[in-house]
């Protein structure tokens, strides 16, 4: 019986994998103009990084996080009935989000020295949550995120929001299809009292709330604003709003962020119920939603400020903020807008063999072309010449180089343009000399690969 991918996961087949590569390349190019550098952290961390950073009362930690145990430690926990006997370093979890791990890395490696410039970092990769699989929500999903540690001014908040909006626009999500929501979560000076007022409101209306929201009253009352139960949402419309309880510093910060967005021409909607799902957020929070075609999974990216997170993972007080965007959600948004362009595989040419005697010469020409940065293919299955032409057409090769015994004896090769349906003879040695001039110009080297037309367009060649 053939195996399928685990529930809640999806294979990145070539077309989607190419789109993922294009997306990450676009992010790297755009984010670098804002001063961001790449970082990669492990796919799993000490569980405490997430329980302390994200918060044990959150759904992400309490319900959705995948724990990781070695075979031996799993047996020990099974025999003991719990993993309480394991050391902290033996308790690992797959990362459900990227921020906590990046902040841990910043603290561990002291990337924000006292008085130094902020650490501006971006990452891309898979995240893992044990959610109920549905469209736009997978158990292994892919995020692109940025984190800025060491910046406290409202300009950093506005810069990050603008960068996120610019990215979606560059990727092709129409601006008219997006809605930016913003809010302030306050800080340790004003949020505790507000949190208590929301808790009291929930308890006063507990007979109207779902069981989950009643539980949240004591663990994480602000999450009730994000409940998908229609009745709970209706009740919470009358709950106290954080904007009415902000301290002077938080209010001034929030007003400055809005003024900067206004000056930059960024449209937004103030949403006093926007709380995001993680405990570490303070002050500015934001979320980008798609207004049509996405159903309940309308959020495609978001983030906010987390000025106390570095301390929870053992660092000194360091202001921070960041965002993450979901690749799979963004793809759905592009599809809904009719703007999805997966891009096709680039195939410059195909080297076709008339018979087996020319195969060594064909392989030599293939190697020379690839060393010059061209994408070329040849037959590895002993197909007939007719079948080779069909394959070249199927993969979208621009030209076909035909090597036959008679032409090869003259040092020639026959070139056919698959678009113009014309043929000509070219000198193989001349083509190789030109290819050698571009040797080493492979994709990713920083050089522009030679165009195949520059190799095989010789004015003095005989035409047939």
Image (cartoon, helix red, strand yellow):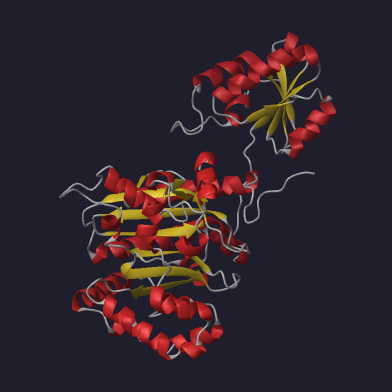
Farthest residue, direction left: 115
Q: In which quadrant will I find the C terminus? A: top right
Q: Position of residue 71 (x, y in %)?
A: 54, 40
**Does residue 413 lie above or below 22 as drawn?**
above
**Count of number-bearing discs:** 0
Give residue 155's quadrant in the image: bottom left
Looking at the image, can residue 69 be seen?
no
In the visual, does 331 lie left or right of 183?
Answer: right
Q: Residue at x 74, y 16 (%)?
A: 359
Farthest residue, direction top: 409
Looking at the image, can residue 64 be seen?
yes
Farthest residue, direction front: 80
Q: Position of residue 348 (x, y in %)?
A: 63, 33
Give residue 310's quadrant in the image: bottom left
Q: Position of residue 439 (x, y in %)?
A: 51, 21
Q: Position of residue 204 (x, y in %)?
A: 41, 91
Q: In which quadrant will I find the N terminus? A: top right
Observer-nearest of 19 and 314:
314
In the visual, does 60 lie left or right of 6?
Answer: left
**Does residue 460 lie above or below 8 as drawn?**
above
Q: Residue at x 43, y 68 (%)?
A: 277
Observer-nearest of 199 and 460:
199
Observer-nearest of 346 and 217:
217
Q: Residue at x 59, y 19 (%)?
A: 368
């Amino acid at each position: 019986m053939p195996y399928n991918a685990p529930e809640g996961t999806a294979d990145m087949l070539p077309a989607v994998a190419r789109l993922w590569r294009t997306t990450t390349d676009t992010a790297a190019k755009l984010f670098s103009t804002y001063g961001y550098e790449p970082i990669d952290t492990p796919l799993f961390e000490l569980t405490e990084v997430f329980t302390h950073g994200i918060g044990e009362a959150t759904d992400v930690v309490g319900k959705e996080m995948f724990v990781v145990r070695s075979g031996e430690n799993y047996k020990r926990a099974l025999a003991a009935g719990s993993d309480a006997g394991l050391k902290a370093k033996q308790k690992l979890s797959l990362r459900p989000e990227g921020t906590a791990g990046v902040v841990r890395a910043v603290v561990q490696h002291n990337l924000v020295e006292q008085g130094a410039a902020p650490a501006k970092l971006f990452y891309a990769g898979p995240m893992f949550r044990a959610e109920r699989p549905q469209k736009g929500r997978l158990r292994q999903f892919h995020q692109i995120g940025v984190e800025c540690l060491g910046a406290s001014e409202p300009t950093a908040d506005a810069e990050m929001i603008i960068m996120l909006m610019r990215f979606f626009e560059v990727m092709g999500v129409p601006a008219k299809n997006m809605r930016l929501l913003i809010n302030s979560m306050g800080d340790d000076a004003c949020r505790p009292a507000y949190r208590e007022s929301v808790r009291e409101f929930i308890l006063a209306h507990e007979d109207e709330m779902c069981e989950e929201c009643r539980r949240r009253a004591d663990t994480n009352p602000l999450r009730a604003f994000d409940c998908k139960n229609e009745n709970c949402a209706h009740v919470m419309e009358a709950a106290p709003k954080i904007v009415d309880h902000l301290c002077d510093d938080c209010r001034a910060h929030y007003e400055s962020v809005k003024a900067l967005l206004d000056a930059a021409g960024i449209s937004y909607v103030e949403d006093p119920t926007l709380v995001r799902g993680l405990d570490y957020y303070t002050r500015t929070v934001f979320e980008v939603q798609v207004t049509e075609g996405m159903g309940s999974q309308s959020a495609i990216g978001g983030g906010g400020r987390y000025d106390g997170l570095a301390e929870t993972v053992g660092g000194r007080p360091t202001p921070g903020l960041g965002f993450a965007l979901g690749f799979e959600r963004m793809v759905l948004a592009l599809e809904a807008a009719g703007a999805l362009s997966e891009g096709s595989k680039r195939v410059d040419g195909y080297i076709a063999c008339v018979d087996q005697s020319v195969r060594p010469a064909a392989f030599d020409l293939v190697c020379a072309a690839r060393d010059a940065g061209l994408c070329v293919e040849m037959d590895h299955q002993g197909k007939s010449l007719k079948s080779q032409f069909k394959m070249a057409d199927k993969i979208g090769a621009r030209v076909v180089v035909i090597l036959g015994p008679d032409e090869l004896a003259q040092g020639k090769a026959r070139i056919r343009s698959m678009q113009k349906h014309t043929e000509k003879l070219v000198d193989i040695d001349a083509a190789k000399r030109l290819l050698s001039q571009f040797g080493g110009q492979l994709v990713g080297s920083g050089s522009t690969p030679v165009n195949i037309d520059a190799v095989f367009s010789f004015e003095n060649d005989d035409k047939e």
